Amino acid sequence: MAGQALGADALLHPFTTDRPNHVDGYAWSYFFEIPGGTTMAQDGVFNIDYDTSPTLSGVEGGLTVLFNHQPVNAVPLRIASPDPTHWQVSIPKKYCKKGFNEIDIISRSRTTLGPCREDDDLMNWIRFRTTSSLRLQFTEPALYPLTAYPFPFVDWTKQPVATLPISVTALAKDRTLSAGLNIAAGWGSKMTNDLLSLKMTREPVSGPSVHIGLQQEFGLPLTTFPIESKNHELWVTGKNSDTIDAAVRALNNPNLIAQMTGQTAAPVEYVPKPDDAGPRVGSITLEQLGYPFTRLAGIGSQGAVLVLRRPVAARLGRGGELRLKFRHSAVLMKTRSILSVTINDQQVGSVALTPENANEGEMVCPLPINLADANEWNVAIIAHNELASVDCAKTYQDVAWTTILGSSDFELREGTLPSSPFLEGFPYLRSREGLLPQSAVVNVGSKPSTEVLSFAATTAARSSQTNRGLTNWTASTGEITGDEDVVIGLLRQEDRFRPVLQKLLVAPSKSGDPKIAGNLPILPSALVGGVVIEAIPKSGNGVSYYVLASSNGALQRFTDYLAKPEAAGLLRGQVAVFTKEGELFTFDTLTPEERRNAELAEMRRYKPEMSVYMTIVLGLLAAAGVFIASKFVKRTRPKQ
């Protein structure tokens, strides 16, 4: 369950996994945000735990820490100690600034076996441990101004991120529940890189929480401000639902938040800016996808990974490609400098970095048919920057560089490949045009439990993260229609799911023993105490996600599981089963052989315009054949 926010001390662990690097002159960066209305109360402490390869030279190697680009400490490397080396660095509060702050670790590492050019030598490594920690203490005002929102109600100085419960009354109708979901969606939009497990309830809450509802339901006077922070609690209320909705839209707009200097605010009506488009059938630039430029600077291999997802219900085919436009330093060695692209671990293109393409380089990477059939694309761009003459004491980040331009574009083509709904990026909602729907509907049943509402809130927050944009969430306590975006229920609610039973691959039954489609290798016993999530086509266009739990407790375990870093990206295929033991199994309705056959059929398929061209060409050839034949056929003269 979500933790309690409202803390002034932070103990952060910058390395979520043990992080090795093999590059001399490696620069690692970590960003943390100072909550609004606070400052650092005293110098912070950065405890860095690391170990190294025994082949490194301690004389030539070292670590340097910078805070907001100011050097604060440096130390020579300790080599091949039996236990990780513990290095404590003071982070001076005098270099702290409002908003985001940056800590950098610059590592210099040489092996004992040769010259300094060992950028990608696997014997050259320094590994930073997950036990490393950053301890910070902030001044805590008596009352946080609303400019700090969503802090302290969402406390990103805790790991995992701590959140207050979202509380509505037992009388809350669909629109109030929807407002709670949209508060959660706004939190997800703010915390783009932190998985959240939220609590939302209609039951009484003891302790601080975020209250949402009609003023008369809370017994508040009609003169109460729609947005008010008091006693470390947030109240989002109104005399009618329109006022509540306007207040939520204001809290989800950073420009309006920045103007809320006190503890109260009245919302204003405004037209939200449409979110940027995601990948779509057709062409879209990296800038439109949120990557105006990608700088790959430094000696040796420098890389970046872009994650793109297939538009919902798009039938794709051959002919897609990534057109990468780039610039690079003109002094790079053209015989050893190269730009390469890998998609889903498959190499798709490379080009030498030469003086001729230093200012207007372009590389076209055709999308192989098996990659066009993927639901998600991890695009890894690697630039290997080499210089002819190198001084080992310098990093050359301003001299050895390659920049990927935002005008690069990614193109998808229509085709005949099967368009199975998928769980990657759950809940992924972007259409074939790359746009988010104006509204997404989640059906929670007529009497939703705290666990159901909490999963709905967590899903709304997750949607803002995976779709990289906000959509308006609508809660429904009515009957299931089959056109919802998310439906949450229990495996014994057969009557409630009757309108869609024939569509489901794993369907509820009154006994609680699910009915499993014959083409799915799922053991019924795996669902005892577990949860199943499946992606089902809508009757029109799009996908519906059905989440069916054996119990409220199982649903809560699944909600908490989705907030774990190690669970990120594990949902895939069309059906997933989360067992009571905490294991996740995924299934696809298409077999590998069926996918290969579909890909072969697409490869053999003529494009529509090619059929026209072939018809014209064959017609011209036939006409030419008749004409030529007529010249060689001997004509018979009529008898005299």
Image (tube, rainbow, N blue to C red):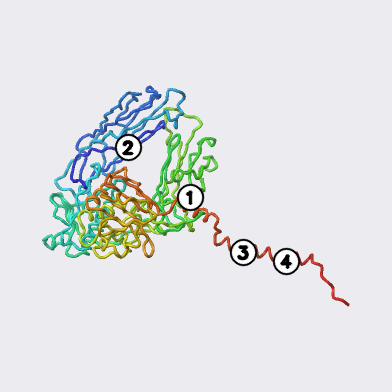
Q: CA distance from mark 4 to mark 1?
A: 44 Å
Q: Which residue sits furthest bottom?
A: 640
User: First in sequence: mark 1 or mark 2?
Assistant: 2
Q: Residue 615: which disc?
A: 3
Q: Amino acid at mark 2?
A: Thr
- Mark 1 falls on what kind of element? helix
User: First in sequence: mark 4 or mark 1?
Assistant: 1
User: First in sequence: mark 4 or mark 3?
Assistant: 3
Q: Is residue 512 left or right of residue 376?
A: left
Q: Residue 370: which disc?
A: 1
User: First in sequence: mark 1 or mark 3?
Assistant: 1
Callout 4 environment at 10 Å: few (<14), some (14 to 19), or many (20+)?
few
- Viewer-nearest residue: 93 or 230: 230
Q: Indicate the position of residue 378 as horizontal and vertical percent values.
A: 42, 46
Q: Residue 626: which disc?
A: 4
Q: Nearer the viewer, mark 1 or mark 2?
A: 1
Callout 2 environment at 10 Å: few (<14), some (14 to 19), or many (20+)?
few
Label 2, on which residue?
17
Task: Tell me: residue 356, above or below residue 619.
Answer: above
Q: Amino acid at mark 4?
A: Val
User: First in sequence: mark 4 or mark 2?
Assistant: 2
Q: Indicate the position of residue 160 as horizontal and vertical percent values.
A: 25, 43
Q: Quadrant of residue 492?
A: bottom left
Q: Amino acid at mark 3?
A: Thr
Callout 3 environment at 10 Å: few (<14), some (14 to 19), or many (20+)?
few
- Mark 4 falls on what kind of element? helix
